[in-house]
Image (cartoon, grey):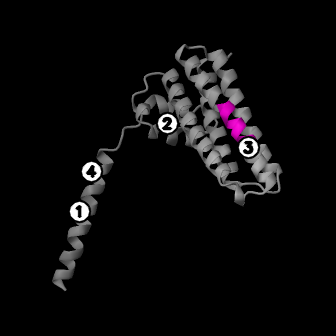
Amino acid sequence: MKSMKNNVALPLSFFICSSFFLLNNAAPENKIVTEVCQKVREKNLCLSSLSAEHAGQDAKDIAAVGLIAINVASNNGSAISVFIKNTLVDREHLGPSVEQNFEDCAENFDDAMQELDDALELITSKDFKNLKTEMGAAIDDADACAMLLNQSGGKDLELFNKANIFRQLCSIAYDIANIVAPN
C-alpha cells in the first residue's frame, strides 16, 4: 500500500509544480488590448483572438491593436478561402445548389481578402476613414456568403459558422477603427 501512495504522490507533485510554472510563465495580458476589447461588440472573441497573437503583447497603441485585429481577420479569411477551394475540388459530394453557394462564397472571400489587404495599407498610413469603408465592405462580403448559406436548402453549417466568425473578426477591426477615428 505504501508503494502505491508513492506512485501517486510523485506524478501528482509533478503536475502541481508544472501547473504553477505554466501559470507564472503565461503571456502577460496587454493592458491596451484589454481596454480596446472592452469597447468592441465582440468583447470575448476580441480578447481571446488578439491576446493569442504574440504581437498583441507588444501593442503600444490602439492603431497597433487595430493592425493586429486586421491580421487576425485576414489569417482567418485565408483559412476559409482554402477550406472553400478544397471543398470545391471534391465536388462529387456537393449538390448543385451547395456547389453554387460555395462558388459564390469563394468570390465573396476573394473580395474580402482584397479589402483586408487594402485595410492593412490604410491602417499603416493612418487613413482611418477609408479603413472603415474597407472593413465595412469585408463585413458585407462575409454577410453575403452567410446569407446564401442560410437561405439554401443545402446549407453547409461548417462554412456558415466559419463565415460568421470571420464576420465577427472583421467587426472587431471595424469597431477599433471607429475608436481611433469616430467620425
Please tell me whether mark 1 or mark 2 is closer to you in this view: 2
User: Regarding mark 3 in the picture, which secondary structure is present there?
Assistant: helix
- Disc 1 and disc 2 in contact, CB within 8 angstroms: no
**Which label is found at residue 103?**
3
**Label 2 Cα neighbours within 10 Å, binned few <14 / some 14-19 / many ≥20:** many
Where does the C terminus fall, quadrant-wise? top right
Residue 175 seen in this snapshot: no
Alpha-carbon span between mark 4 and mark 1: 10 Å
Please tell me whether mark 4 or mark 2 is closer to you in this view: 2
- Disc 4 and disc 2 in contact, CB within 8 angstroms: no
**Image spot of residue 67 (x, y percent):** 52, 25
- Disc 3 and disc 1 in contact, CB within 8 angstroms: no
**Label 3 Cα neighbours within 10 Å, binned few <14 / some 14-19 / many ≥20:** some
Q: Mark 2 = which residue? A: 50
Q: Quadrant of residue 28?
A: top left
Relative to 33, is 155 on the left or the right? right
Please tell me whether mark 2 or mark 3 is closer to you in this view: 3
Q: Is residue 97 above or below residue 37?
A: below
User: Magenta residues, as a range?
Assistant: 104-112
Q: Nearer the viewer, residue 21 or 79?
A: 79
**Which label is found at residue 21?**
4
Rendered residue at 44%/32% (across/down): 56
Relative to 82, is 94 on the left or the right? right
Rendered residue at 51%/40% (across/down): 49
At label 1, which amino acid type do we have? Answer: Phe
**Image spot of residue 40 (x, y percent):** 61, 33
At label 3, which amino acid type do we have? Answer: Glu
Where does the N terminus fall, quadrant-wise? bottom left
At label 4, which amino acid type do we have? Answer: Phe
**Which label is found at residue 26?**
none
Q: Mark 1 = which residue? A: 14
Q: Earlier in the sequence, mark 4 or mark 1?
A: 1
